[in-house]
C-alpha cells in the first residue's frame, strides 16, 4: 500500500498538467509576446482616436478600424484567474464574448479539458477567427473549443446549454445586453468575469450597477486585476 499511493499520485499529475502542459505554455508564451506588438497598432490608431475624442465621441470609435490587427488580450494573471475559477466551479459550458486571437480561449479551454467541458467563443473579425482556431489547435485544445464567427448577440442566441462560466471581453456597450441574454441560461453558482471595468468606467457603469444589484440575480465585486475585472456569481435560475 505504501508504494501504490505515491505511484497513483504521479500518474494523476501527469494526466492533469493544466496550464503547465508544455504545448499550452509554449503557445501562450508566443502569443503574449506577439500581443506586445499592439503598441504599434495603437500608435497607428492615435490620429483616429484623437479625432474621435475631439468630436466628443468615445476613443474606441476612432480606434475601431485598426483593431482587427490588435490582440488586446487578458494578461497572464487574468488568464490564470479565468482558468482557476473555471476549474474551481467545474465549469463545463464556458462562454466567451470576444475571442480575438484566442489567448483567453486557451486559458479557458485548459479548464474545459480538465472539466470534460467546452468553450464556446465568439469573434466578429473573420481573420481573427481563423488565427484563433489555429492558435487553439497549436495548444492542443481544438477539440474543446467552438469559435463562432459573427456578432455574439446572434451567434450566442441559439446556445442551448446550461452555462457555467462567462467571460465578457468584446466591445463594452454589449456587456449588459449580453448578460441579460445569457442570464436565463446560467446555473446558480455560475461565474461571470468581465474585463476592462477601469478602462471603460463610464460605459460599463450601468453593467456594474446591474451586476451589483442582487435583485438582478447576481452578487458581484470589482477586482483590481489587469484593467479591472467584475467578478459576479449567479444567485438563482431566472424563470424563462
Ligand atoms: C479585447 S478583444 C478580446 C481579447 C481576448 N478575450 C483575449 O483575451 O485574448 C475584443 C474582441 O471582441 C471582438 N468583438 C467585439 N464585439 C463583438 C461582437 N459583437 N461579437 C463578437 N466579437 C466581438 C473584437 O473583434 C475583438 O477581437
Image: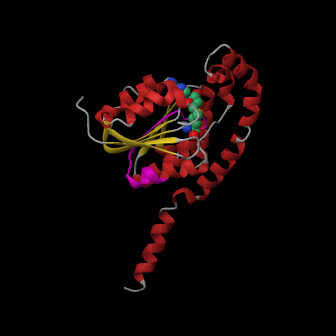
Q: Tell me which residue sits at (72%, 20%) in the image.
A: 50
Q: Which residue appears at 48% of the width and 63% of the height?
A: 15
Q: Place residue 21 in its image quadrant.
A: bottom right
Percent across and percent down for residue 235 are 29, 42
* Ligand 1 located in image quadrant: top right
Is residue 81 positioned above or below 97 on the image?
below
Q: Position of residue 85 (x, y in %)?
A: 44, 51
89 shown above or below 229? below
Above or below, 63 against 40 in this view is: above
Against 5, is 202 above or below?
above
The residue sitting at the top extreme is 55
Query: From where the camera sits, is residue 39 visible?
Result: yes
Residue 98 x/y as whole percent: 53, 33
Give the magenta range: 84-102
Q: What is the basis of the colouring in this image?
A: secondary structure
Q: Residue at x 47, y 54 (%)?
A: 84
Amino acid at each position: 500500500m505504501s508504494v501504490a499511493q505515491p505511484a497513483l499520485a504521479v500518474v494523476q499529475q501527469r494526466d492533469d498538467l493544466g496550464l503547465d502542459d508544455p504545448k499550452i505554455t509554449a503557445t501562450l508564451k508566443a502569443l503574449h509576446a506577439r500581443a506586445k506588438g499592439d503598441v504599434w497598432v495603437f500608435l497607428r490608431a492615435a490620429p483616429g482616436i484623437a479625432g474621435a475624442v475631439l468630436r466628443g465621441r468615445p476613443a474606441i470609435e476612432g480606434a475601431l478600424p485598426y483593431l482587427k490587427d490588435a490582440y488586446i488580450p487578458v494578461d497572464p494573471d487574468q488568464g490564470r484567474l479565468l482558468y482557476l475559477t473555471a476549474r474551481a466551479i467545474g465549469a463545463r459550458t464556458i462562454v466567451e464574448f470576444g475571442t480575438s486571437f484566442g489567448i483567453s480561449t486557451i486559458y479557458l479551454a485548459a479548464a474545459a479539458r480538465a472539466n470534460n467541458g467546452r468553450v464556446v467563443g465568439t469573434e466578429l473579425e473573420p481573420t481573427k477567427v481563423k488565427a484563433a482556431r489555429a492558435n487553439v489547435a497549436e495548444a492542443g485544445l481544438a477539440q474543446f473549443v467552438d469559435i463562432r464567427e459573427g456578432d455574439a448577440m446572434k451567434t450566442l442566441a441559439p446556445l442551448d446549454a446550461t452555462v457555467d462560466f462567462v467571460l465578457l471581453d468584446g466591445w463594452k456597450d454589449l456587456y449588459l445586453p449580453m448578460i441579460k441574454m445569457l442570464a436565463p441560461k446560467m446555473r446558480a453558482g455560475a461565474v461571470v468575469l468581465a474585463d476592462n471595468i477601469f478602462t471603460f468606467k463610464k460605459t460599463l457603469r450601468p453593467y456594474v450597477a446591474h451586476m451589483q444589484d442582487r435583485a438582478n440575480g447576481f452578487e458581484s465585486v470589482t477586482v483590481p486585476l489587469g484593467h479591472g475585472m467584475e467578478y459576479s456569481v449567479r444567485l438563482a435560475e431566472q424563470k424563462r
